[in-house]
Amino acid sequence: MKTISYITLIFLCTNFSLTAQEQWELIKDKDGIQVYLEEEGTYAFKTFKGSTTIDASIHDFVHTIFDLERYPDWGHNVKSAALLERKGDTLQIYYSIAKAPFPYKNRDGVYRNKFSWNPDEKELTVSIEVLDDYLAENEQYIRVSGNGYWKVKVLAEDKLDVIFLMQVDPGGAVPSWLANLFVEDTPFKTLTNIKKTIDQHKSKTNHYSFLD
């Protein structure tokens, strides 16, 4: 079963919104993390959503997303990540490779993160989009497609409500019904690991002016 867990890699939702018609099924509730699945979407694969609370500042959260060197520490099955472009503190484009066990090829993708802060709601949205044409495809890997987002609401000075949502097509000949059996791995393990990473690297010097 582990041979397809890479399918739910992240790391990748521009203008991806939830509507009242969406019906989420809770499939996991463990260690303060809830994982939901939703059938409808652009791709044949189910959309997943993970939610939890994190004891940290919003600045610590943003710092972790920007720190691509540590991305493999918390991104589920992420092998590497490298910055391609950054504009201020509100846009980041990076290239990432996700591990896949033999005999499958590793997956790769170019991801664009856009950071948007709502000061009235004290809520951060980080939209995630896989860019199809930013880099030519590498025959060593299979290029993924998808989109998603992070939504982070400040509940208190060091308390965040975090939602991670993704819809991904890993490409290649993998049956969607089989891949969908494992979509709980990515949100659960990603949220578990990002909590640990943020806790280990909190700093009073982490500050982003667009959050003021």
Image (tube, rainbow, N blue to C red):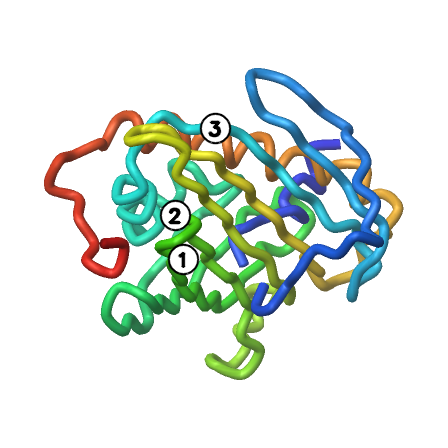
Residue 185 found in image quarter:
top right
**Crowding near the residue tagged with mark 2, few <14, some 14–19, many ≥20 C-alpha atoms within 10 Å:** some
15 versus 107 height, above or below: below
Label 1: element kind: strand
The residue tagged 2 is 122
Image side of residue 165 versus residue 87, left or right = right
Discs 3/1, front: 1
What amino acid type should be assigned to the residue bearing mark 3? Thr
Residue 85 found in image quarter:
bottom left
Residue 53: numbered disc: 3
The residue tagged 1 is 118
**Crowding near the residue tagged with mark 1, few <14, some 14–19, many ≥20 C-alpha atoms within 10 Å:** few
Q: Are marks 2 and 1 in contact (CB under 8 Å)?
A: yes
Q: Position of residue 194 (x, y in %)?
A: 42, 34
Q: Are marks 2 and 3 in contact (CB under 8 Å)?
A: no
Label 2: element kind: loop
156 versus 105 height, above or below: above
Residue drawn at x 49%, y 38% is: 162
Q: CA distance from mark 2 to mark 3?
A: 15 Å
Viewer-side residue, 132 vs 105: 132
Q: Position of residue 82 (x, y in %)?
A: 33, 61
> Which residue, as the protein is rendered here, is positioned at the far left?
205
Residue drawn at x 35%, y 66% is: 92
**Crowding near the residue tagged with mark 3, few <14, some 14–19, many ≥20 C-alpha atoms within 10 Å:** some
Discs 2/3, front: 2
Which image quarter holds the C terminus? bottom left
What amino acid type should be assigned to the residue bearing mark 1? Asn
What amino acid type should be assigned to the residue bearing mark 2? Lys
